[in-house]
Amino acid sequence: MISPGILIFAGTTEGRKLAEYASEHDINCYVSTATEYGKSILGNLKGIECISGRMDETEIEDFVKDHDIRLVIDATHPFAVEVTKNIRAACLTADTQYIRCLREGGKKSDVCEDGEEENIVITGSVQEAVEYLRHTQGNILIATGSKELHLYTAIEGYEKRCFARVLSTREAVEESVRLGFKGRNLIAMQGPFSAEMNVALLHQTEATYFVSKESGKAGGFEEKVKAARETGAVLVVVGRPEEEGETLGDVTRMMEHFSAGKKK
């Protein structure tokens, strides 16, 4: 079998769209997701070979070399900084072209117009958000994922005061329960969520604060802003790391050019 020559690291809306675009336009490629759940979301796409499981830098480099990959597209989550670092380093070592696919609305200045929203607090990390919240009162709805959920245990009375919304995967739920988030304080759901759903959860949890990463349009960030505004909750935003890369449209055109050149 001749290698497709393209490897997409997915796990985001952008990654799924790239995989679907490739399938629809007969561009054969490999698509890598961190989990089986991520793989299942992609479904069975024609011409797409899906693989699941996290790879470190060495494993990425080996896969690229073993499968004669000439183009790697990084469409991982904007906050998966370490993953992007490993992919980029592996491509550099393997002398393979690397493209970073950016999510729309990737600048911290895009969080709100001129930063004038009174109910928005922008922080540089989850740790900074937690430090801010430690000096407040009132319930907190957390929507920053399970990976850094342990940081919120530094908040006094977090078991009753904090409500964690995490992915409905066994791994995420078990980790949350281990940390002390359980019963009505643990919400396992798959997003992105509508503004109405966010409003309902803010009311249900009686949250004064709503913590979110700046996940862009694809991650439902606009709906979180609307919900906070409607309920009067303070939206504590973990600003997205600044990145350089290409838009989704530019990446699809690059895939087409690469595929056309490979078929000649």
Image (cartoon, rainbow, N blue to C red):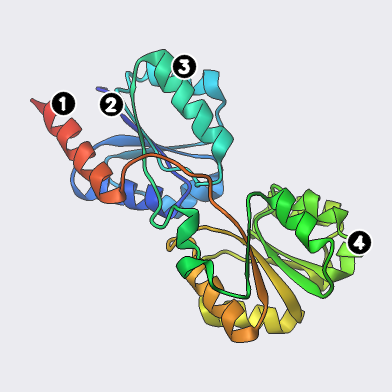
Secondary structure under badge 4?
loop
Q: Earlier in the sequence, mark 1 or mark 3?
A: 3
Q: Residue furthest right?
A: 157
Query: Is residue 143 something one can see in this rendering?
Result: yes
Q: CA distance from mark 2 to mark 3?
A: 14 Å
Horizontal side, residue 6 vs residue 188: left or right: left
Image depth: mark 4 or mark 1 in front: 4
Residue sitting at x 46%, y 54% = 41
Horizontal side, residue 242 vs residue 263: left or right: right
Q: Counting other residues with Cα less than 10 Å from the Cα at mark 2, is it few (<14), some (14-19), or many (20 or more)?
A: some
The residue pinned by badge 1 equals: 262
Q: CA distance from mark 4 to mark 2?
A: 52 Å
Q: Position of residue 217 (x, y in %)?
A: 43, 63
Q: Compared to 94, does 261 lie above or below?
A: below
Q: Earlier in the sequence, mark 4 or mark 1?
A: 4
Q: Position of residue 241 (x, y in %)?
A: 53, 45
Q: CA distance from mark 1 to mark 3?
A: 22 Å
Secondary structure under badge 3?
helix
Q: Mark 2–mark 1 contact, CB under 8 Å?
A: yes
Secondary structure under badge 1?
helix
Residue 5 — which label? 2
Secondary structure under badge 2?
loop
Q: CA distance from mark 2 to mark 1?
A: 8 Å
Give whichever of 15, 112 is nearer the camera.
112
Give whichever of 15, 157 is nearer the camera.
157
At label 3, the amino acid type is Asp
Residue sitting at x 63%, y 50% = 124
Q: Compared to 172, does 84 lie above or below?
A: above
Q: Earlier in the sequence, mark 2 or mark 1?
A: 2
